[in-house]
Image (cartoon, grey):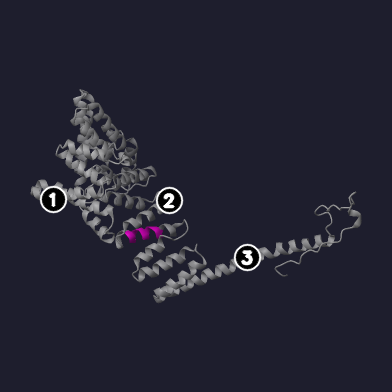
Amino acid sequence: MSDKDEPIRETELDKNSVTESTDAETTAPEIGTTAHPGAKFRWCVIVCVLTLLVPGIWYWQKGLNAQKQTDFQSACRQAIGREDWTALIETASAWSEWDSEAADAWLHQAQGFQELGQLDRAAELLSQVPGQDDKTEAALLVASSLYFEDLGQPLKAVPVLKKLLKLNETLITAHQRLIFFYAITLQRVKMLEQIHQAIEVGAEPPDAYVYLQLASRLTFSNGYRLNQTWLRNKPDSQLFRVASAIQLSAARDQAANVDNEPLAEKEKRHGAIRDLAREFPDNTSLLRYLLRLAVDRDDTDVVGQLLAGVPPHAWNDSVFWRFRGWYHHQFEEFDEAEQAFRKSLELFPQDWETWHSLASTLRKKKELDGAERAQLIALQGKELRKDILQLSDARAVSPEVLTKMRNFCMACGDQVTAASLQTRIRMMINYR
C-alpha cells in the first residue's frame, strides 16, 4: 500500500436531495449525508490494515534500535580492549549523536578523553550524562572530583554538586564537598546554609559540625595554600584572591603572639587587606576581617565606618550583628546592643563570642541572672573551640567531641542541631 491514500472522489448528488429555493439558488448538502457506501468500506479496510501494521512497524523499529545500541556498545568495548582511545571517542560520539539519552555513550567518551589526559573535557562530558539513575550520580561525583582535585577548578564543581543533590539530596559526599569549599573560601553564610540543608535531610557528614562550631572564625592551616592553587587556575577570581589573603593574614595573626612579629610587618599585611577592600568594597569577607581588627584595637570610628558600608544583603550574616552590638555597647546604648546581640544569636546560636558580649551588656543593665547564663554558655563554647582546634583534621572528630557539641547546642537552645548530633553520635558508636 502506498504512503498516500487515493483521494475519495466526490459522488454525484441525487437530484431529489437538492431543494430549489424561490430565487433558484441551491443549498449545499450537510456534510456526510451523501457518502457512498463504497467509500465507507474503503475507510474500514484502511483502519484495519493500519491497526495491524503500525504495531508491527513499532516492534520492528524497536528491534533495530536495540541492535544498534548493542553494536555501539560492542564497538566501544573493542576499542577499550585495544586501548584505542581515539576510536572509542569517535564511536561513543556517534552513539550520543544518534541517541543523546544513552548514558553509556557519554561515559565512554569521557573515558576516552580521560585516558588521553584531557581531563577538562572528560569532566565536562561526565557532568552532562543524562538520566536519573546510579550511573548519572556516579558520573557527576567523578566530574566533581576531577574539577576539585585534578584540575583545581572548584567553581566548576559547585554546579555539578548542586545538580547531583537535585537527583539525590541525601548524598553525603556532595554536601561534604560543598561545605568544605564554602568554608575554605570564607563563604560563611553559604556554608551555614549548606550545613543546615544537610542536617534537614539527615545527610550531614560528621565534620559538618566542626565547621559549624568554627563558623565565627574560619581560619584553616591549608586555607592559604588551597586558595592560591585555585587562584593560579583562575587569576581573575575575586573569591580566591580575597580568601587567600585573609587566610594568610589571619593565620599569622594567630601565630604573632608566639613569633612576636614586628609591628611593621603586621601593618604591611593589614594594609594589603585594606587595599583589597578598596578594590572590592562590598566583599563581606573583607568587611568581617577588617571589623575584627578594628574591634581588637577598640577603634570605634573605624567600626562605625565599616558598619555603614555593610551592603543590605549582608545583614543575614550574624557576625555583622555582633559587631553592631559591640558598637552600641561602646556608646552605652545597652538596649540597642542587646537587640543586636540577640539578632546575631537568632541567626547563629552557636557563636560563643556573641554570648560573651551579651553577658557583658546584660551586666551593664543589671540583669545578672541572664548575664550569668550567657557567660556560662560562652565559656562552654570557648572550651569546645579549643578541643576542636586540637583535631588533626575536621574528619577526625570523635563521638566524645560531638557529644560536647550536642551539649553546647542544647545550652544555646538549638534543639534541632542537638537532635541531629545525637543521631550521628549513635551511628558512630554503633559502627565502631
Asked if the magenta segment contains residue 145, the reply would be yes
Q: Is residue 222 in view from this perspective?
A: no
Q: Relative to 325, is 23 above or below?
A: below
Residue at 23% over, 57% down = 228
- The residue indicated by pointer 1 is 268
Amino acid type, label 2: Lys
Q: Position of residue 402 (x, y in %)?
A: 27, 42
**Quick one: label 2 or label 1, which is nearer the N terminus?**
2
- The residue indicated by pointer 3 is 59
Q: Is residue 384 in view from this perspective?
A: yes
**Marks 1 and 3 close (CB-CB < 8 Å):** no
Residue at 37% over, 66% down = 121
| Spatial separation of the CA atoms under disc 2 and disc 1 | 45 Å
Q: Position of residue 231 (x, y in %)?
A: 26, 58
Amino acid type, label 1: Lys
Q: Relative to 408, is 218 above or below?
A: below
| Spatial separation of the CA atoms under disc 2 and disc 3 | 35 Å
Helix, strand or loop under label 2: helix
In the image, is 63 to the left or to the right of 54? left
Query: 208 or 192, which is in the foreground?
Result: 192
Please give the range of residues in magenta: 138-147
Our reading of the magenta stretch's main secondary structure is helix
- Residue 314's disc is none
Q: Relative to 326, is 15 above or below?
A: below
Helix, strand or loop under label 1: helix
- The residue indicated by pointer 2 is 166
**10 Å neighbourhood of mark 2: few (<14), some, or many (≥20)?**
few
Query: 224 or 298, which is in the foreground?
Result: 298
